[in-house]
């Protein structure tokens, strides 16, 4: 006897109607993609849960991978046996003996298969008695047991599960459309991407890169961050925008104090156009109100003015401490704090306007040929697709 299955519960997916099917289908696809390295496993969906048949694979790494996939409420190791009383008793005894730190238990039988001859209450007793007679250290506690053993009697077979492992929750990535994440090398934007993914959003990323002011290593950092994000959902397409020429020009030609606002507006214009080309309907940034000069209400207003796309700001009301604790949890923090300048710290004027005036920004921009600048940039954009099983990401010497 051994654990030969993993049961995945959907949780929030317990939505009604047509969506449910779409969600389950997407989750199936995301799980299958993550388990790509285990060709023997078989994934099956039912209305209320998914089962992974292990076919001899070690469950631990598979559970680790599944634990972070959005749309999974909880997971359990399971034993599948025929609908046979003796086999079920034996499997329950195995599961109890395997469980750690347990003194009290409870049996909960669910008899979806009404052809099974024993009612669920009575069966709880039958199995409970079997466990008590065959062990010495356990007692039954129906109110607050250390372990709840579930016996799920279905048409095809019976599944015995014990400990529940908490899943990532949220909705399967891909069920809420796609969004373009402005991904700097900083701490905030990857966290913003992660939070949007939690609501089912699929991510593409855009990074504004300014060599030689920003190094190859800074770009690598962004690709590494994107790769971390693939753990929670799907692969991530990263658009790398050559930003040096335009940034230098802004720095030279736009009056002191307004250069950052103009630069941000250009970032949004370019992002919007990329989104448009990719059929993406919204943008995401890592802005949070009041963090720095570009993140005041007036500044956001002046910057946001150039786009008709919704700009999602999942961190808007979060303080730095909470953002950092998420970054640590999702393993992006140590990448984000690698010491390379991002293009913005380099060009940020000592005293950017915290309350830029919209008319002034527009006036200054009229001195530039924005359409031509955009065109020059679009000719040089490079795209890299990062996936969770990308071994080492190319140094991409050919990029810029
Ligand atoms: P982060 O930690 O994400 O870098 P930040 O606190 O440094 O954010 P800003 O520098 O004001 O804040 O940037 C605000 C947002 O603008 C970032 O969260 C990111 O979404 C976007 N952004 C800034 N620089 C870049 C860049 N070089 N490429 C892509 N997006 C960028
Ligand atoms: Mg930054």
Image (spheres, helix red, strand yellow):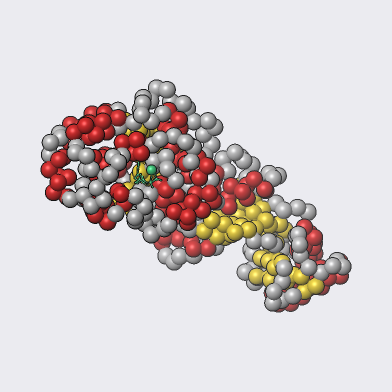
On screen, residue 42 versus residue 242, left or right, reads: right
Q: Residue at x 51, y 34 (%)?
A: 390
Of residues 5 and 184, the one nearer the viewer is: 184
- Judged from the image, the quadrant occupied by ligand 1 is top left
- Residue 305 position, x and y percent, is 21, 50
Q: Residue at x 15, y 35 (%)?
A: 368
On screen, residue 317 versus residue 171, left or right, reads: left
Residue 245, compared with residue 203, is above or below; it is above
On screen, residue 219 versus residue 304, left or right, reads: right
Residue 248, compared with residue 107, is above or below; it is above
Of residues 25 and 174, the one nearer the viewer is: 174
Among all residues in the image, which is located at the extreme front? 350
- The quarter of the image holding the C terminus is top left
Among all residues in the image, which is located at the extreme top? 398
- Residue 302 position, x and y percent, is 22, 50
- The answer to whether residue 292 of the structure is visible from this angle is yes
Q: Quadrant of residue 378?
A: top left
- The quarter of the image holding the N terminus is bottom right
- Residue 211 position, x and y percent, is 35, 27
Q: Residue at x 58, y 47 (%)?
A: 65
- Residue 233 position, x and y percent, is 48, 47
């Amino acid at each position: 006897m051994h654990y030969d299955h993993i049961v995945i519960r959907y949780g929030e997916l317990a939505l009604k109607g047509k969506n449910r099917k779409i969600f389950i289908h997407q989750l199936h696809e995301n799980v299958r993609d993550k388990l790509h390295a285990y060709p023997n496993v078989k994934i099956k969906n039912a209305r209320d849960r998914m089962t992974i048949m292990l076919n001899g694979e070690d469950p631990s790494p598979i559970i680790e991978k599944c634990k972070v996939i959005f749309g999974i409420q909880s997971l359990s190791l399971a034993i599948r046996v025929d609908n046979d009383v003796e086999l079920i008793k034996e499997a329950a005894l195995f599961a109890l003996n395997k469980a750690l730190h347990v003194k009290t238990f409870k049996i909960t039988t669910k008899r979806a298969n009404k052809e099974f001859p024993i009612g669920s209450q009575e069966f709880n007793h039958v199995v409970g008695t079997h466990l008590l007679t065959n062990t010495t250290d356990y007692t039954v506690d129906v109110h607050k047991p250390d372990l709840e053993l579930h016996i799920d009697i279905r048409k095809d077979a019976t599944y015995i599960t014990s400990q529940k492992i908490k899943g990532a929750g949220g909705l399967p990535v891909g069920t809420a459309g796609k969004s373009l994440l402005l991904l700097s090398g900083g701490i905030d934007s990857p966290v913003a991407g992660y939070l949007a993914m939690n609501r089912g959003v699929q991510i593409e990323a855009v990074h504004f890169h300014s060599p030689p002011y920003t190094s190859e290593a800074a770009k690598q950092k962004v690709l590494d961050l994107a790769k971390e994000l693939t753990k929670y959902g799907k692969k991530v397409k990263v658009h790398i925008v050559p930003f040096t020429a335009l940034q230098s020009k802004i720095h030279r030609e736009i009056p002191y104090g307004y250069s950052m606002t103009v630069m941000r507006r250009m970032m949004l214009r370019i992002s919007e156009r990329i989104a448009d080309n990719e059929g993406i309907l919204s943008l995401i940034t890592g802005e949070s109100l009041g963090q720095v000069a570009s993140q005041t209400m007036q500044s956001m207003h002046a910057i946001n003015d150039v786009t008709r796309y919704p700009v999602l700001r999942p961190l808007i009301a979060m303080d730095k401490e909470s953002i950092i604790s998420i970054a640590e949890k999702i393993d992006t923090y140590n990448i984000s704090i690698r010491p390379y300048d991002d293009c913005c710290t380099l060009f940020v004027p000592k005293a950017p306007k915290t309350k830029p005036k919209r008319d002034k920004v527009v006036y200054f921009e009229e001195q530039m040929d924005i359409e031509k600048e955009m065109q020059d940039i679009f000719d040089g954009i490079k795209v890299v697709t990062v996936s969770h099983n990308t071994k080492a990401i190319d140094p991409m010497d050919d990029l810029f």
